[in-house]
Image (cartoon, coloured by chain):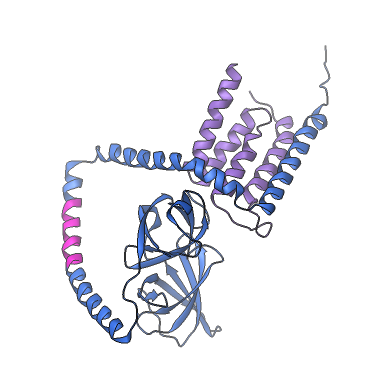
Chain colours: A blue, B purple
Amino acid sequence: MIYLLRNKGRRRIKTPAIATLIFLFIIIAVSALAPSFFPRIISSGTIPLWKGGGCLENGVGNFFGFFQTKSSLLKKNDELKQVLVSKQVELLKLEVLKKENNDLRLLLGGRTETNTEMAEVLSKPPRSLYDTIIIEGGEDKGRIAGARVFFKDSALIGEIENVYGKSSSVKLFSSPENTIDGFIGRTAVTITLSGEGGGNLSARLPKGVDIRKNDVIVAPGYGDFIIAKVGSTESSVTDSFQTVRLKSPIGFSGLRFVFVEKP
Amino acid sequence: MANITRRLIADLILLISVVLLPWWLSAPIAIIFLFVFDSYYEILIAGLIIDSLYPHSFIIPRISIGFTFLAAVVFLASFPIKRNLKFY
């Protein structure tokens, strides 16, 4: 015997379609009236998960680290020792330059250091989207939108975009559609960088401007903080401009702590 | 009862994946659950969570709704797809 299938497809989709439209309407209406309503509730609820997730990542890393062979660890240790020695020499040179820089700034009557506060990174790329990071501390720690965010005392990586109760979201300079002005450290030529996502930035400069691979781009204002490093330059015969491809000075996936400018 | 338990466990997995994993890993998980369970409305909540955690305003100015909108489209598209698919 042949049984015909009952055609209840259209009826089945009608209710979910109406429910979805109502849901979208409510979300748009609430977001338009109170833009931080959902972010505030959801970010406060996810902080324990992020913290737990960080412990889990460390635990998994340690577990797999246990299975590394002794010879590979010895080899890695030797390599790291060599790197450490070269970095110590560079550090000494940097200390001298830093002191000289501070003295010159004092002579010119400028500020010599930035007042910052350390903050733990709760979510970072690739987990977070659009080159943003979520850091611990929001209104409870007096954070304000627009405050600059640093990596140690050498790199400026972004600005606080949204402040919630106990967390804040930081928009990195490499975030798409983001632009920032800086200047080439070696030649002091002004350059406007555009975020490309994934820790990448780009800029367009006239062909005559002297810019090379590994040049650093420094943020304007006091502090001489690095915002990007030149990766490559591209130009064609017919174009009077050159395209500069830049990378953020630090890898965001290894970021654990940042420093936030205090108001 | 077993169905509800399975669904609750799936919801928990989805929530954890949305918060802790990159979007390109949590999106396939959400799509799998969409086809495993009937009317998987939770995918809309997952979209809302992503939009709220990482605000942007690509579709509507000053309103972060991109992932919620995408989740709604996938959710509604799943009905005709599921109707025409046969699971063995």
Q: Residue at x 60, y 16 (%)?
A: B1
* Percent coordinates x, y for residue A109 in the rendering: 33, 84
Dominant SS type (magenta): helix
Q: Residue at x 40, y 38 (%)?
A: A52
A197 in the magenta segment: no
Q: Quadrant of residue A106?
A: bottom left
* Percent coordinates x, y for residue A86 in the rendering: 18, 66
A81 in the magenta segment: yes
* Figure quadrant of the C terminus of chain A: bottom left
| Numbered-mark total | 0
* Figure quadrant of the N terminus of chain A: top right
Horizontally, is A194 left or right of A111 in the view? right
User: Which residue is farthest top?
Assistant: A1
Horizontally, is A26 left or right of B23 in the view? right
Does residue A262 sit above or below A33 in this rendering? below
Does residue A21 sit above or below A195 in this rendering? above
* Percent coordinates x, y for residue A210 in the rendering: 40, 85
Q: Quadrant of residue A58?
A: top left
Q: Quadrant of residue B6?
A: top right
Of A39 and A23, the residue lying toward us: A39
* Percent coordinates x, y for residue A242 in the rendering: 49, 80
Span of residues in magenta: A76-88
Q: Residue at x 42, y 54 (%)?
A: A141
Q: Residue at x 40, y 80 (%)?
A: A184
User: Which residue is farthest bottom?
Assistant: A208
